[in-house]
Amino acid sequence: MMKATIVIPNLNGAGWLKDSIESIWAQTCQDFHLIVVDNGSTDESLEIARSYIDHPRYTLIENKTNTGFSYAVNQGIRMADTPYVVLFNNDAFAEPDWLEALIRTADQDQRIFGVSSLMIRHFQRELADDAGDYMTLLGFACKRGDGLRWERYSQPCRVFSACGGAALYRKSILDKIGLFDENFFAYYEDVDISWRANNFGYKNVYCPAAKCYHIAGATTGAVRYNPFKSIQSGRNSILLPYKNMPLVMLILNLPFLAAGYLLKVIMFRLKGFGGDYAKGFHEAWKAIPKLDKPPFRLVNLPNYFWVEGSMIAGLFRYIVYRVQRALKIT
């Protein structure tokens, strides 16, 4: 049995898919199978994906339409028969020892669910794009280290969530807690599944030795904001805490969440996407009945407390981060 299955979802990635795949074939650890899931591409990237079809450790799945990130990666996960599944964005490029570092970290502890990479901005190589994700009491899911010097994040640590753009997941735990929630379509689905793992007492960790470079927003066209991302953010920011917080926790945190949503409404209006964000809110109420909300389990009470503490710490982390950005500290 191979050690890992790497899944790359692709949508119109002609400008970067080949380099992304080639960085995978160049890994020092070759104990993997690569699956590319094409989500109805209309550019030359589908032909690029097809050009590897004769490779013995390669599978291409061709969807006719854009099914969303969650559905696409779930297709790859369901095909995997390896201990680990690794997700990798089509606009990311891995250092040769990236996979080896991820596997080495996961092998250290059977309770590790997700291992997050050090994602570095492709066009600003001195700055981090993501060093693991965190949640705040305000309901904000944030990228740790975004826009700060990546050398600040040289130590491994536990994180709230592994960023799905370049992350390893333990397949046996996926089999227990379920796959990515397809109601999220795109954005926050990786935070959702990591939160679920936290609730069950598993861990997500950050591995600074697993380096890759990320263009960010290349597929959706949203480095920061656009209508699509604004709608997704509005909807999924409602679904995320509703699904993963037990009722009592949700009630206790409601004032903070309400404050966070108000701040987001103001921010998106100032950016010119207030209507799109509101549309996402509207879509959330239609999606809530479709969610598979895990039931409260008394045995998970210590894990709920850990999540709450992590969100409190995340709020202070976010405040410090905003001050750093305002002062242009990197």
Image: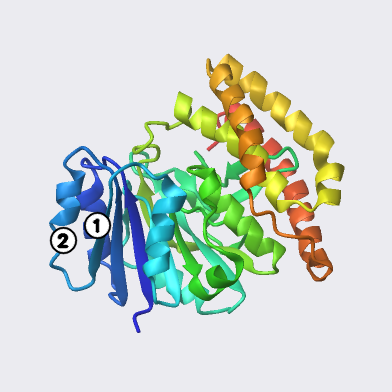
Residue designated by label 2: 52
Circles 2 and 1: CB atoms closer than 8 Å: yes
- Up-down relation of residue 76 to residue 108 (above or below): above
Residue designated by label 1: 21
The quadrant holding residue 257 is top right
Q: Is the image coloured rainbow, by chain, by secondary structure, or in one colour?
A: rainbow
Q: Earlier in the sequence, mark 2 or mark 1?
A: 1
- Up-down relation of residue 119 to residue 77 (above or below): above
Which residue lies at the image location 46% right of the left edge and 51% below the top edge?
70
User: What kind of element bears circle 1?
Assistant: helix
The quadrant holding residue 81 is bottom left
User: For the residue marked with disc 1, what is the amino acid?
Assistant: Ile
Q: Is residue 246 left or right of residue 144?
A: right
The quadrant holding residue 328 is top right
- Give the image location of residue 14, x and y in percent: 21, 42
Q: Is residue 248 left or right of residue 295?
A: right
Quarter placement of the N terminus: bottom left
User: What kind of element bears circle 2?
Assistant: loop
Q: Is residue 140 visible?
A: no
Which residue lies at the image location 46% right of the left edge and 29% below the top edge?
228
The single residue placed furthest to the bottom in the displayed view is: 1
Q: Is residue 251 left or right of residue 22?
A: right
Tell me the crowding category of disc 1: few under 14, some 14 to 19, or many 20 or more residues within 10 angstroms, Cα based: many
From mark 2 to mark 1, how far is it between C-alphas? 9 Å
- Up-down relation of residue 193 to residue 44 (above or below): below
User: For the residue marked with disc 2, what is the amino acid?
Assistant: Tyr
